[in-house]
Image (tube, rainbow, N blue to C red):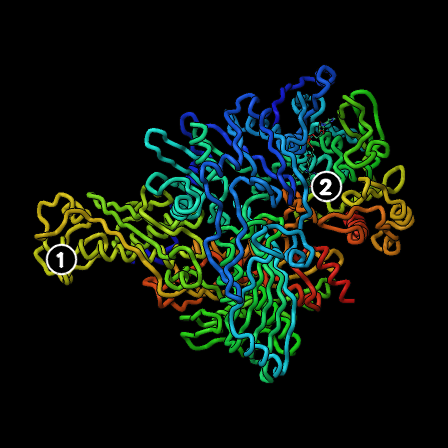
Amino acid sequence: MGVEGIGARVTRKEDKRFLTGKGRYTDDMTVPGMKYAYFVRSPYGHAKIRNIDATAAKAMPGVIDVLDGKQLQADGIGNLICGWMIHSKDGTPMKMGAWRPLAVDTVRYVGDAIAIVVADSSGEARDAAEAVVIDYEQLPAVTEAVAALASGAPQIHPEAPGNLIFDWQIGEPDAVDKAIASAAHVTEIEIHNNRLSPNPMEPRATLGIYDTAEDHYTCYTTSQNPHVARLVMSAFYNVAPENKLRVIAPDVGGGFGSKIYIYPEEIICLWASKKTGVPVKWTSDRTEAFLTDAHGRDHVSKVKMAFDANNRITALKVDTIANLGAYMSLFSSAVPTYLYATLLSGQYDIPAIHANVRTVYTNTVPVDAYRGAGRPEATYLLERTMEAAARELGVSPAELRKTNFIRSFPHQTPVIMNYDAGDYEASLNAAMQAADWAGFAARRSQSEARGKKRGIGMSCYIEACGIAPSAAVGSLGAGVGLWESAEVRVNAVGTIEVLTGSHSHGQGHETTFAQLVAGRLGVPIESINIVHGDTDKVQMGMGTYGSRSGAVGMSAIVKALDKVEAKAKKIAAHLMEASEEDIVIENGELKVAGTDKAVPWFQVALASYTAHNLPSGMEPGLKETAFYDPSNFTFPAGCYIAEVEIDPDTGETDIVQFVAADDFGNIINPMIVEGQVHGGIAQGVGQALLENVQYDANGQLLTASYMDYAMPRADDLPSFSLSHQNTPCPSNPLGIKGCGEAGAIGSPPALINAITDAIGHDRLTMPATPMKVWQALHAAH
Amino acid sequence: MYATSYHRASSVEDAVKLKSANEEGKYLSGGMTLISTMKQRLAAPSDLIDLRHIPAIRGIRIEGRKVTIGAATPHADVAASRELAAICPAICKLAGHIGDPHVRHMGTIGGSIANNDPAADYPAGLLGLGATIVTDRRSISADDFFTGLFETALEEGEMVTSVTFEAPEKAGYAKFNNPASRFAMTGVFVASTAGGVRAAVTGAGSSGVFRHPGFEQALASNWSPDALNNVAVDPSNLMSDLHANAEYRANLVKVMAKRAVASAG
Ligand SMILES: Cc1cc2nc3c(=O)[nH]c(=O)nc-3n(C[C@H](O)[C@H](O)[C@H](O)COP(=O)(O)OP(=O)(O)OC[C@H]3O[C@@H](n4cnc5c(N)ncnc54)[C@H](O)[C@@H]3O)c2cc1C
């Protein structure tokens, strides 16, 4: 195809507005009469609210009103819900505690919203918020998942005795125990997956507008899936019926999962707009973002991996405790279950797997999906275990992996997933070659001569993207279907609008989606516009997360394009008095194959709208809609290799090289894919070496600013070496698998395996800060 | 941020007058600490007296080996000064590793030492150089100036106008960054000065920047990194926080001291 079709390195169309500061984000939206909100939030991790006195606050300058949870409840606004039902192994449904958008009698984490102040300016709103007097009775708090399960731990929700939300399992416990009992070798390890704060560049914001005349609401919000926001706000929170609620997610500056969920603020600002009669805008500051954006990860697991005498894995047993925070966020229950334990087979042929997962409430901000969502936790656990096993068994990490790779497809794992295609050894070989694995010993001696410790580590990850077949996720408890919709709208002059239910918040859909259309029709990429993020424009959609926009969102566009093409060919055939089967679309023309007869694309478009000369019985217009529901997940996989040099005097880790060999199936825009991988690895480096959310025993967030929460920066990162292997995905028309999360999934274990290789033992938890590495080095002696 | 009134002082006298007229006011230099504290509503000065536009307290003056740096001189100017680098490269290097380019172009030496953050770099530099801090009313030796965590000898309304020091025979600075803030998790400045060898440690002490007599004695008899091998660093007076406990800091103090000596040549 032409230079701007699939496979071309087209520079991003959206970057002109982003790089020149012309992006339009939620906080850029202003409407006449708009006022500002500030939230009164709990300063305590756990407390009873005895009384709220807003008298003084209401009398302050500029204040329009102060509203609390009792008023919200009285107006029938519902509680926030988790949309994925999980049943415990005893058959009981998960124990969901009530999450009121504004806390009424109990606050359960520092940052829990209690009241909203609406005022003429954000400064006045904040001043008044400080004047709201709340009488608290402090309660004991618990912030660590393991501690929350201990007897005598503070009880967070009456609905969940012992703070246990569910005790779930997957796989065959008996088969696993039997295999472990008769194993030639069993590797045991405890794995901690550190808690992370998502930190998108744009903090959350929302603008709620109530129109009295139409009894209609408009919600601008920083959302990854505006349609789901509308659905949930209508169906569960009783904000307004769907036809009376428009949700717009304009430019959104990064999400990483944290903007999937419906938070209290959107609901409250809409309601407050009706209560006060003015449009209400709220913009989170960075401290609020640390305190209230859903966190990620936070697992503690015990692992046993059994091997036979030939180093083949015979069983895997995993016992995980996952911290879900103070309330169950929208998809929180799915992350440590179906997005995690279903990937525990990794790239390996493991005959028996059993995973037990307990999720618990703690006095911390809710935990939900964060870039990778469950899959980084599975990969980290598995790949650290493989590394430990290789060392114990005295074989090279590559050899142990090769011995156990799945080599024929489709492959049914013992934990639901059916892998459709892959070539794991191809990525492993490519990565080892790029990293010059064979030359490592020499490099290590050079480092030693300089007094440094050098280590190398690999990670072979697999993940499930493109979520997913609606019927399958429905049977597993999902409250929504996970298809995608598209509409291709050809204008009378031949330019094209593509309406998609996917949502771009940095991924570059305006470019890649346009490439698909440009390539198919041979029309200039400038003639194509991508429309997304507005429930009034796009009929319905499921949004962007889980690397699903390519595999699912673009597949829907393909289906709609098929219909558009079919109709265009009919019109062209009619205009040229040719047979429909003979029409081909090339370089912006519809041609009669093998002749020089052609009509330009725009003329067919025009003909469809003038409707002067259409095939008899044909409806005018050229616009088609499609819904695409995938038949399977997609399975990106790859091999990452990290090489580190450690300064034994300080414990500082220098990443001297990082190699990523990924199989994403077919690639639409290599430049954008590389950017996704770079960003993902940067986040993985963050998790492995730098980032760690820490609360104190009372539930105070200790890492509530960049002074204490360490984000990766450019000089923390090496230049990455990337390559792509390709086994096209058989289940979608474009053969694409997804690339948005791989970097964050595959990189942490490669880095930690490299560091533990350098220090000579594997007693190390993430993040591997200089102090921890220094301590680990000393512990080795 | 709470509402505040902004004043641009035209001279040192003007600034001091404005300050005494506004008891709840504060001097503003680069604002790199003060403005963010105000944004978090942890400080609420009624008035801000901006010192950055007073020509007399901005810039670097070198007379022979005597160095004077105006209080309102941004870190970037110190980092980039060739004249200063010719006689005291260590202080240029120190300034060049403060924060990021934005911070270095706004933050000033006067603001930094008046603030005396226990993890700031300049306090180690000035204490290590045996500098003198000049104010609108007196001169204070660095040994007397830094009195505790965010505490200095400055009196109410007293304004730093410059710092002066004799260029040392040799000096070096080594800093280990806090991984999050990139302030000094430990920074050690060593100098061989006319008044003897000095070694100052920042980022580590539980009451702020301090001199290390053990290092100073060892280096006085043998100016080499190895001279410090057997000098003990007592962790009991060092900070423990999320990023580093006292034991690890004690190790860093020693390692950074050796690197500082090595870098001094
Ligand atoms: C992101 C970031 C990273 C940083 N990293 C580092 C680092 O690595 N190392 C480091 O050392 N520092 C670091 N800093 C601090 C920075 O270097 C500034 O020097 C410091 O914030 C204070 O200088 P200022 O000129 O900005 O003072 P301001 O913020 O304007 O003032 C600070 C305080 O000093 C008072 N004051 C200001 N000038 C005078 C004066 N002339 N006389 C008396 N009182 C005065 C003010 O009233 C205020 O109380 C960092 C800051 C930021 C924001």
Q: Please tell me in which quarter of the rendered image ligand 1 is found.
A: top right
Instruction: Report x, y in % for residue B252.
Output: 78, 52
Residue A375, relative to residue B7: is it above or below?
A: below
Mark 2 highlights which residue? B94
Query: Which residue: 19% across, 50% down?
Result: A601
- Quadrant where the N terminus of chain A sits is bottom left
Q: Circle 1 sits in a helix, a strand or a loop, which is it?
A: loop
Disc 2 residue type (three-letter): Leu
Disc 1 residue type (three-letter): Asp
| Image side of residue A612 versus residue A356, left or right | left
Label 1 vs label 2: CA separation? 74 Å
Between residue A747 and residue A524, name the one nearer to us. A747
Whether residue A111 is visible, yes or no, is yes
Q: Chain of mark 2?
A: B
Q: Circle 2 sits in a helix, a strand or a loop, which is it?
A: helix
Q: In terms of image quadrants, where is residue A585? A: bottom left
Residue A526, relative to residue B5: is it above or below?
A: below
Ligand 1 is within 8 Å of the C-beta of the residue at disc 2: no
The number of numbered discs placed on residues in the rendered structure image is 2
Instruction: Report x, y in % for residue A591.
Output: 16, 57
Q: In terms of image quadrants, where is residue A298? A: bottom right
Mark 1 highlights which residue? A596
Marks 1 and 2 share the same chain? no
Query: Which residue: 44% across, 63% down?
Result: A476
Marks 1/2 in contact by CB < 8 Å: the verdict is no
Instruction: Report x, y in % for residue B39.
Output: 62, 31
Q: Chain of mark 1?
A: A
| Image side of residue A583 versus residue A718, left or right | left
| Image side of residue B48 versus residue A93, left or right | right
Q: Residues within 10 Å of mark 1 (few under 14, many from 20)?
A: few
Whether residue B64 is visible, yes or no, is no
Instruction: Report x, y in % for residue B82.
Output: 69, 36
